[in-house]
Image (cartoon, rainbow, N blue to C red):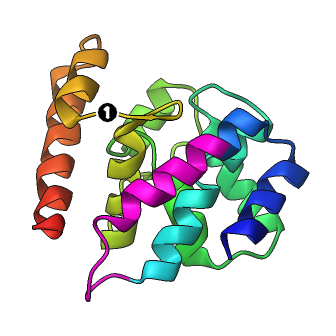
């Protein structure tokens, strides 16, 4: 299954570094899967969360990635993971301020939250701690940092 997503990433135009990052995010995300989680959706979402990086490496990569997934006929649940994976999500107002389409990009489902959190724990191809992530985002607003921390605490409970 993962091989299919690797090929999809490459065919969309992602480089080997993005594909490797997605593989590590998928490995990390699976630590939080359990009985109440759709494992195959978490795996698929983790593997495709950065497909938009085939077009851009800026903040719009999530919305562009969701467009790519829609054009490929991917299920809505998977497309929403791609759309909502940035940090701990973005409100429609935050999207507007950032010059993005003004849509709600806040993770809602457990699968969306797991992928967003796992992505926060992977810098390039290296797994980091949530404390290391918090140090790397020191320039973000207090609101954004709190949201990332709360997401981490919610998802980390799943691995216990």
Classified by dominant secondary structure, the portion drawn in magenta counts as helix
Q: Label 1 neighbourhood size at 10 Å, few (<14), some (14-19), many (20+)?
A: some
Q: Residue furthest top?
A: 139
Q: Is residue 155 left or right of residue 39?
A: left
Q: Residue furthest bottom?
A: 35
Q: Start and end of the magenta stretch?
A: 20-37
Q: Is residue 44 above or below residue 91?
A: below
Q: Quadrant of residue 64?
A: top right
Which quadrant is home to the N terminus? Answer: bottom right
Q: Is residue 14 above or below residue 136?
A: below
- State how many labels appear: 1
Q: Quadrant of residue 148?
A: top left
Which residue is tagged 1? 128
Which quadrant is home to the C terminus? Answer: bottom left
Return the x and y of residue 31 as percentages of the image width and height.
31, 64
Residue, x 56% and y 29% (percent of image)? 59
Q: Would residue 28 be counted in the magenta stretch?
A: yes
Return the x and y of residue 143 as percentages of the image width and height.
18, 30
Return the x and y of residue 91 as percentages of the image width and height.
36, 44
In this view, the residue in front, 12 or 88, is 12
Q: Secondary structure at mark 1?
A: loop
In this view, the residue in front, 46 or 126, is 126
Residue, x 60% and y 59% (percent of image)? 47
Residue, x 75% and y 58% (percent of image)? 6
Q: Is residue 86 left or right of residue 131?
A: right
Q: Is residue 47 visible?
A: yes
Return the x and y of residue 101 as percentages of the image width and height.
59, 41
């Amino acid at each position: 299954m993962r091989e299919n997503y690797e090929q999809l990433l490459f065919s969309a135009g992602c480089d080997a570094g993005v594909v490797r990052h997605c593989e590590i995010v998928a490995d990390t995300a699976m630590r939080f899967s359990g009985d109440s989680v759709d494992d195959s959706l978490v795996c698929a979402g983790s593997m495709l969360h950065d497909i938009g990086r085939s077009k851009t490496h800026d903040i719009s990569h999530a919305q562009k990635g969701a467009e790519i997934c829609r054009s490929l006929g991917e299920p809505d649940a998977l497309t929403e993971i791609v759309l909502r994976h940035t940090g701990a999500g973005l409100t429609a107002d935050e999207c507007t301020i950032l010059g993005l389409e003004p849509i709600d990009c806040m993770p809602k489902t457990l699968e969306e939250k797991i992928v967003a959190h796992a992505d926060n724990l992977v810098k390039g191809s290296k797994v980091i701690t949530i404390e290391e992530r918090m140090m790397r985002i020191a320039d973000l607003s207090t609101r954004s940092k709190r949201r990332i921390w709360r997401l981490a605490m919610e998802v980390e409970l799943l691995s216990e």
